[in-house]
Amino acid sequence: MKLRAKLWVLYLAAILLVLLIISASLLLYTAQLDPVIRAQFKAFLTQHYLIFLLPLFFIIALTALAFRWVLEKQVVPLYRLSDALNIWAKIHPGHRLPEEGGEVVRRFSKVFNSVAAHFEDLQENLESKISDARADLEEEKNTLAALIEELNEGVVVCNLENRILLYNQKARLLLDRAAVEDPADRGGPVGLGRPIYGVVDQKRLSHALGNLKTRLNREEGSHAAQLVMYGATQQLLRCQVIPVRDAAGELGGYILVFYDITHKVKVDSHRSMLLKSLTEGIRSALASIRAAIETLTAFPAMDDAKRVQFYRVIGEEAAQLSGFIHQTASEFSEHFKSQWPLENIPGGELIGAIRKSAAEKLNLEVDWLPGAEELWVRAESYSLVQAYLYMMRQLQARLNVGHFRMQLAEDRLFNYLDLSWEGAPISLELLETWKRGALMEGEDGIALTLQELLDRHDAEIWSHNDSPSNTCALRLAMPRSVAPQLLQGKVVLEGERPEFYDFSLFHQPGQTPELDQR
């Protein structure tokens, strides 16, 4: 039933109720009158009923007109306003209220329509700005993808759960053997949502991330770490670990940039062997020339035949030396000295990593003696930590040492890192034996000898002892390094166009590998 019909039914019911009340009142009144007066009253009503009915009719008609006016001018328009408000709020923001009904209702509709028009303009303006912002963001994403496409480095982006969020084709070719054999095969370990530990050693990466968190907390040092690893086809890779900060400045993820340094290291190694051969050849020739000159100087009265013979030896050795140098320079002029990829790290950070690893893996307490904690060293921190764990293991087994101390020192040319203990010293022969030992203990460590690690760091180690204090130490000497300059501003990553990317994935708790098959 419609609103009007309902209200008219209510109105008629009210009129009937009033008439019933009036009729009942008259009946009660006449019932109390004297019979003679009651008969006279009934006769009067019968003869003059119009006197009562006409006023009653006019009253009912006036109330009906008033009710109709209120209904059409106030009630029905308000009911229509409620429907129009629902349409505006839930369906169509452009809908407007009808300006009808009484003065108050029309004023309300007019004011509301003005507010609604202003709101719609604001909403359209906001949507336009959001659309523009999305277009700008998409353009920036495409620009980033184009930048990444131009370089030969592999790029992998991971979240704190160590799952891959972004990678490019170059990264797949460097890390995924399946991609090398068939680029269309996406069943290898490199894929969206897959753990990075499938291609990068977990211990090395955890060590690098620990160093990154320490630097971020201290706001010091280069906000990047490096590690060296082997790729899918056993090529040597240098991996740079770059932090990604969230809005609060905390570590929200990290970026791995892979550089293929196989050829460089191979050439460097060849160059080192060449220089060694060159040095030995020059030393032999110079020794012969020097011996001949010293003989001529020591015997000035030597007869001419002997003197000519020595002159001939000097000339032949000089010619041989010149030819050897010329041949070597022409064949290997583009080779460089071998260098293992190193990074500048705070000395205090290195000692902290050694102490933590010693406590966790060897259950050894290592004190940190005050010294030059602000020094920087150029090293590959993971391998250096493994070297000190190796030496502590040997000292613990040989000399039953259960407590160590570490200290940093420096002079004009070198930085020194001392590992000291109380007790018996170690012999030079024993230290030389340790240098030939591999830095491996079960699954821990690295496949290098201590001497190879020292060579890669241009470092040397020796033992010394302080008899009065009954203290012995192993001193590691490394070339001095300086603190790197912090780079300000935004870092733009470059590599090949990513196969998959969604930068909002940093805020998602986990990924699904099935997405990679889409």
Image (spheres, rainbow, N blue to C red):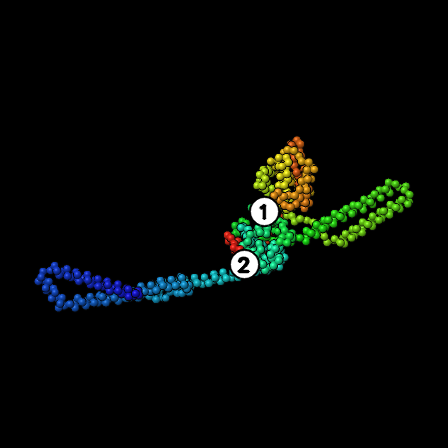
Q: Is residue 277 left or right of residue 401?
A: right
The residue carrying pointer 2 sits among few (fewer than 14), some (14 to 19) or many (20 or more) residues within 10 Å by Cα, namely few
What's the amino acid at mark 1?
Lys
Nearer to the camera, 71 or 2: 2
Residue under label 1: 203
Q: Is residue 3 above or below residue 373?
A: below
The quarter holding residue 490 reads bottom right
Nearer to the camera, 361 or 151: 361
Mark 1 or 2: the one toward you: 2
Q: Residue at x 78, y 53 (%)?
A: 327
What's the amino acid at mark 2?
Gln
Tag on residue 517?
2
Q: Is residue 262 above or below residue 37?
A: above
Q: Quadrant of the N terminus?
A: bottom left
Q: Residue at x 49, y 60 (%)?
A: 130
SS for callout 2: helix
Image coords of residue 484 (percent x, y) = 63, 48
Q: Residue at x 61, y 59 (%)?
A: 182
Image coords of residue 161 (percent x, y) = 53, 50
Q: Is residue 421 left or right of residue 128?
A: right
Q: Is residue 72 above or below residue 193?
A: below
Q: Is residue 102 visible?
A: no
SS for callout 1: helix
The quarter holding residue 399 reads top right
The residue carrying pointer 1 sits among few (fewer than 14), some (14 to 19) or many (20 or more) residues within 10 Å by Cα, namely few
Q: Earlier in the sequence, mark 1 or mark 2?
A: 1
> Label 1 to label 2, Cα distance in Å?
29 Å
Which residue is farthest left? 36
Image coords of residue 4 (percent x, y) = 29, 66
Image coords of residue 255 (percent x, y) = 58, 53
